[in-house]
Image: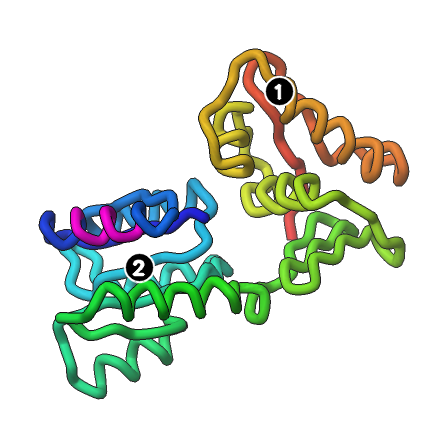
Amino acid sequence: MRILVVEDEPKMQSLLTEVLSDAGYVVETADDGAAAVSIARAARFDAIVLDVMLPAIDGFEVLELLRRRDDWTPVLMLTARDAVGDRVAGLDGGADDYLVKPFAFSELLSRLRVLLRHGAQSVARALTCGPLTLDPGTRAVTFGDDVIDLSAREFDLLHHLLRNANQVLTRAVIIERVWDHNYDGFSNIVDVNVRNLREKIDRRFGVGLIRTVRGVGYQLVCPPR
């Protein structure tokens, strides 16, 4: 599972990375709020550990920006503030949990496990592309009134394409964000799964939502809402 750690204090960031990596998580880091928003928009994470006191854009604003774009990745907020008002502001803003510094790393790991078990499904909104709808909560995919049966990886790929609708995504980027490992230039795993999606969506319903951008990658083309 992938965790984004947003912490500007180098020592704390290093400690969090070490603890989470030792626990088996794949960790990516951001030093400020703007970088955190950019990274979260570009990649898929299972949870975000978000410090409140950040340069430029603080943790509350990062959280607001994520939720505004329907990113319901579980967020555990960290802060040195212990005021009740700050905790309420974080939770009301869409945070899933709140941990006050200093804290025991064992508690951090315990709270993360709880968040990861619950996931983002209960609050995630359905994504649409014309008559195509994907519901992250139920993992249901429909085209109008017809149900589309997808494998787990096909679902994840379509989810990523929908979250980045009308953007051209390279095979390398898709591999990194959907399969979570380094791209093998000789692998055709992306092409195979795109072909499966085309069979189940484009050819079945006579549409052309998934387009190949020759020499680059793929694009899910959706009509404006």
- The residue depicted at 20 percent of the width and 69 percent of the height is 104
Image position, residue 60 (x, y; %): 27, 68
Q: What stretch is highlighted in magenta?
A: 14-20
- The residue depicted at 44 percent of the width and 49 percent of the height is 45
- The residue depicted at 76 percent of the width and 35 percent of the height is 197
Q: Is residue 126 left or right of residue 96?
A: right
Considering depth in this image, is 163 or 179 the residue closer to the camera? 179
Total numbered labels placed on residues in the image? 2
Residue 107 position by quadrant: bottom left
Q: In the rendered structure, find residue 24 and report the number of the disc placed on it.
A: none
The colour scheme of the drawn protein is rainbow
Question: Which is more N-terminal, label 2 or label 1?
Answer: 2
Question: In the rendered image, is residue 223 in sight?
Answer: no
Q: Mark 2 points at which residue?
A: 49
Image position, residue 135 (x, y; %): 68, 59
* Amino acid beneath label 1: Val
As helix, strand or loop, the secondary structure at mark 1 comes to strand
* Amino acid beneath label 2: Val
Q: Mark 2: few, some, or many residues within 10 Å (few <14, many ≥20)?
A: many
Q: Mark 1 points at which residue?
A: 213
Q: Is residue 151 above or below residue 114?
A: above
Image position, residue 189 (x, y; %): 64, 24
The answer to if 80 sits in the magenta stretch is no
